[in-house]
Image (tube, helix red, strand yellow):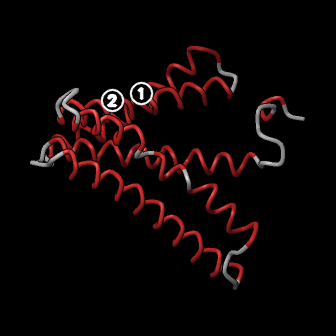
Amino acid sequence: MDDRLADVPPGTEAGVLADRLKERIYATITMIAVVVGLSFGEVSALGAVATVLTTAVGLWLAALVADQQAHRTVHRHLATGRELRRMLYVSSPLLSCAAGPSVLIALAALDVLTLDAALLAAAGVCVVSLFLWGCGGGLRMGGGALAALVAGLVDAAIGVAVALVKAAAGH
């Protein structure tokens, strides 16, 4: 067995795990844009959490519709059974991207911190996540600590760039 796949759950293809991580990274980048945009608006904690949750659900539904349509077009039938379970498994991280921001917004609703601080902290947590995934990927590729650090910094820079673009646009 390939050493790089030693920690992959039995019966799970590496490609499925890669697709799942891709969805999570995509959702994290999208969530950065959402929470930074919310920080520039006049929104309540309830409105902010509703936006975060509907964004996650919308991303998830869009992925499922796209996957099902692509499957139907290529295979000439709807995905069912194992194929549908794979789609649901791969796309589920799109929903989890709302967890961190929702918890931070809930803390703002409880007056533990301001809503602006919660939204900016959520963006920060998302950027740190990108950094950690980049580092993890760099380490798994066998490039050593320096290569992992560079990979993490590049991924985090993408998240920061998204935040800066949203901030520069003022929404």
Is the residue under label 1 in contact with that under label 2 (CB below 8 Å)? yes
- Is 132 situated above or below 93? above
Q: Is residue 59 left or right of residue 34?
A: right
Please provide percent x and percent y for residue 80.
71, 75
User: Could you tell me the amino acid type at mark 1?
Assistant: Val
* Residue pictured at 44% horizontal, 49% vertical: 27
Name the residue carrying label 2. Answer: 124
Mark 2: which secondary structure?
Answer: helix
Residue lying furthest right:
1
* Residue pictured at 60% horizontal, 26% vertical: 138
Between the C-alphas of marks 2 and 1, the distance is 6 Å
Q: Is residue 161 left or right of residue 65?
A: left
Name the residue carrying label 1. Answer: 128
Image disc number at residue 139: none
Closer-to-camera residue (103/36): 103
Closer-to-camera residue (150/39): 39
- Is 171 situated above or below 106? below
